Amino acid sequence: MTQNIYDTDTFFEGYSQLPRSQRGLAGAPEWPAIRALLPDIRGQQVVDLGCGYGWFSHWAVEHGAASVLGLDISEKMLARATSINADSRIDYQRCDLERLALPSGRFTLAYSSLALHYIRDLGGLLRSVREALQPGGRLVFSIEHPIYMASLHPDWVNDDQGGRSWPVDHYQVEGQRTTDWLSAGVIKQHRTLGTLVNLLIDSGFRLDRLIEWGPSAQDLATHPALADEIHRPMMLIVAASRDSVQPIT
């Protein structure tokens, strides 16, 4: 079972103070890059994996999606989603993504924002998502970059220019990583970039686009606090399509 850290009071309170929690997609600097990879949302049957506050779910129906199934393991997150982002076209449900079971061919778009790095059996999840997508269906997601996860943050060292750098630690050693972010003992799953891409391919997806996201000059002008993120990639943004070839078993 996925760790349900979001239902702990300390973590949820800290999360609620983040700009992306308070301002929705406008508070997520990577959103323009993600939006550029999305298909025409009109008429789409969407599943939002790790929907959180429901910001994307609500955006999708506002922009013409036929329906959205928003899934999250956290009761607190779902309660917030239903209070601030409710819509008759959105069905919010509690779900452990490690045990995802969806109707075959039900969806045309699967979306996930910064949730998949918590999943231990990512290959199993990807195979379930592929089965739930119609032929040609799309998967668009963001995930913490493996180099970011393997960095010794929040500890940092001075580089030769007097700036900050985060040395990568045991990048090739995949598996569970425990970090302190908003609260102590947050469990994430580290895998290399190669492993992530091969999991997609082996699960029956065609990789369409891979972005190692970092802040643009405009982002830095608007959000100076993002300056540290130019030293190493913060997240990956991935677009993939359901392949016609059966996944490798």
Image (cartoon, rainbow, N blue to C red):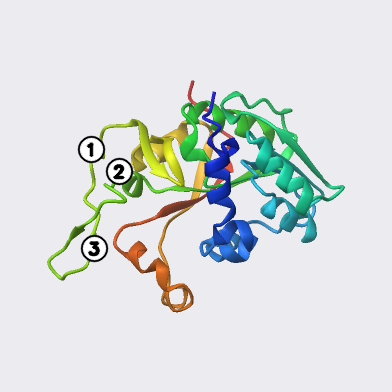
**Visible in this render: residue 148?**
yes
The residue beneath circle 2 is: 150
Q: Residue furthest top?
A: 249
Q: What type is the residue that disc 1 sits on?
A: His
20 to 178, vertically: above or below: below
Mark 1 secondary-structure assignment = loop
* Residue 45 shows in this picture: no
Q: Secondary structure at mark 2?
A: loop
Q: Which residue is mark 3?
A: 164
Quarter holding residue 69: top right
Residue nearest the observer in this picture, 217 or 19: 19
Residue 170, disc: 1
What residue is drawn where x is 56% and y is 26%? 98
Q: Residues within 10 Å of mark 1 (few under 14, many from 20)?
A: few
Say left or right for 231 vs 127. left
Q: Is residue 14 left or right of residue 184?
A: right
Q: Nearer the viewer, residue 29 or 108?
A: 29
Of labels 2 and 3, the one closer to you: 3
> In the image, 76: left or right of 159?
right
Q: Are marks 1 and 2 in contact (CB under 8 Å)?
A: yes
Q: Within 10 angstroms of label 2, few (less than 14), some, or many (20 or more) residues?
A: many
Label 3 Cα crowd, 10 Å radius (few <14 / some 14-19 / many 20+): some
Amino acid type, callout 3: Arg
Say what secondary structure mark 3 lies in.
Answer: strand
Lower position in the chain sequence, tag 1 or tag 2: 2
Estimate the x, y position of residue 246 in percent, counting from the top left.
56, 28
Q: Residue furthest left?
A: 160
Amino acid on which the number 2 mark rests in the picture: Ala
Q: Position of residue 55 (x, y in %)?
A: 68, 54
Of the two numbered discs 2 and 3 on the same chain, state the one appearing first in sequence.
2
* Residue 241 coordinates in the image, percent (x, y): 58, 44
